[in-house]
Image (cartoon, rainbow, N blue to C red):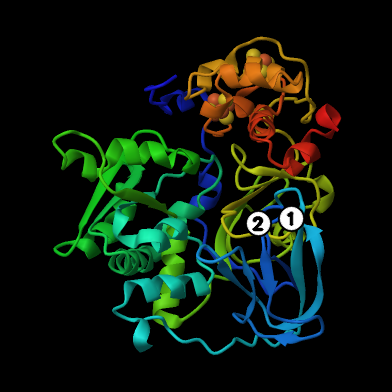
Amino acid sequence: MDGFLPTFTRRKLLPPTYREATWDKPVLRLGEPERVIIPLQDSPGTSYQVAVKEGEDVTAGQKIGVMGEAPASLSVHASISGTVEQIAALPHPLGFQAISLSIASDGKHETCECSPLKTGDRAGNGRKVLEGLQEMGIPLSYRHLMANDSRVSCLIINATEFEPYITSRHVLLKEHGNEVAAGLQVLMTACSVKQAVIVVENTHTALVEPLKRDGQGTVDIRVRGVTQPYPDTANWLLEDKFSPLKSNNKHGSAQGLMMSVDLSSLFAINNAWVSGLPFTEQLITIAGSAVRDPQNVWVKTGTPLSPIITHAGGDLSRVGRLVLGGPLMGIPQHTLAVPLIKKAKGLFAAVAFLVDEHRESRFYKQAPCVKCAKCVDVCPASLVPNTIADFVTNKLLNDAQEWGVFHCLECGLCEYSCPSRIPLLEIMRLGKVLLKGEDCLLGRNVFGALYG
Ligand code: SF4
Ligand code: SF4
């Protein structure tokens, strides 16, 4: 496997992207939910601080806690105004119980006083701007930046949309391209970075024009068109393939660090810079056969999944498969009580597994492997997913490692194409966490029957 560069051209073996349902629709804003649930942990054991007490009134945008430890800590904010009714371990979309704050809305829509980052003594001091972004709850690779910001030489922005059905990334560019571009400028200045590469599908290069235009003259912003989209888990591939640092260097090796940045973070950076607004709302796509009105919608962070599905005309009793993040790579959910968390750009509710949605399906029931090798055909890393899955489920972890489980890009193409509905992606993830000896709550939740 060493030296082999995965390619996503095999994706063409999959069904169409089904993006027409949401691409051209007006973007709405979900009304304020009755309550939000805001986790202070993003994995079991993450350290946290709580800045409010049960019974205390809070306003939207108020800091209510801190997730993680400095220098990589992230401030957490209330997304609605109301009363903190509970601070307790509550279900998290990643499958564990996370210390979370439940805030009941008071219906007043009160917002805390915000101070734009561009004012005061922060402006002109890159490090202080970056610290300010952390305080606004914007997730970036702060470990790199705060350790030694001069080592970051180039930003890579993956503007491709890998997931079928999901259009939120492209719609954000379509509706708010100028704000995203302004956020990129702020980040580049704060990090003293002169180069950025934006990777986008050849069919959508017009969407990133504002980002390119804003940078002209002062910084080097390049657009790279690709025929097939790349998942965020393969951003290192984009760095390897498109880094201008490489072409500037006669030895062909990359110098300095490249940092991948998410488009929604760039949008949030502009909000923090211009208006002082913390990152408490995000644009998501709601799609799938369980919703009557698939759409892109702005949703307050921490909103439980049920009002989101209901908003899109979803019948909660018909939701057979619920995925946070997209049908390929999303995290399957087992309860509607979990909240929307940052980075979840799509909420996918379906009554049946999608590949077979237009045929009479077995309704998402797993069947034995029929050795059809469809999973092998689509795997961009040239793995043999069915064999690795066999090893993992039979606890032959060393064999799974030898057959390349750590080369899995977690793209989900194998699982999506499997006619037997075998949860191959989840088995790959489970194999990795077991081999790393990490706590495996997600795996236990999904595969209690295997390892329980
Ligand atoms: S094993 Fe499956 S999830 Fe992993 S890279 Fe191959 S197709 Fe993608
Ligand atoms: S696609 Fe599914 S049924 Fe076909 S070989 Fe792979 S695991 Fe087996």
Q: Is mark 1 within 8 Å of ligand 1?
A: no
Residue that carries the numbered disc 1 in the rendered image:
92
Ligand 2 picture quarter: top right
Residue 119 visible at all: no
> Which is more N-terminal, label 1 or label 2?
2
Residue in the picture at 54% in, 39% down = 164
Nearest to the eye among marks 2 and 1: give it: 2
Residue that carries the numbered disc 2 in the rendered image:
42
241 in relation to 153, above or below: above
Q: Are marks 2 and 1 in contact (CB under 8 Å)?
A: yes
Quadrant placement of the N terminus: top left
Q: Amino acid at mark 2?
A: Asp
Find the residue positioned furthest to the top: 371
Q: Amino acid at mark 1?
A: His
Give how far across and how far down residue 262 sits, in percent.
Answer: 44, 55
| Cα distance in 3D space between marks 2 and 1 | 8 Å
Give how far across and how far down residue 207 sits, in percent.
Answer: 34, 54
Give how far across and how far down residue 161 sits, in percent.
Answer: 46, 44
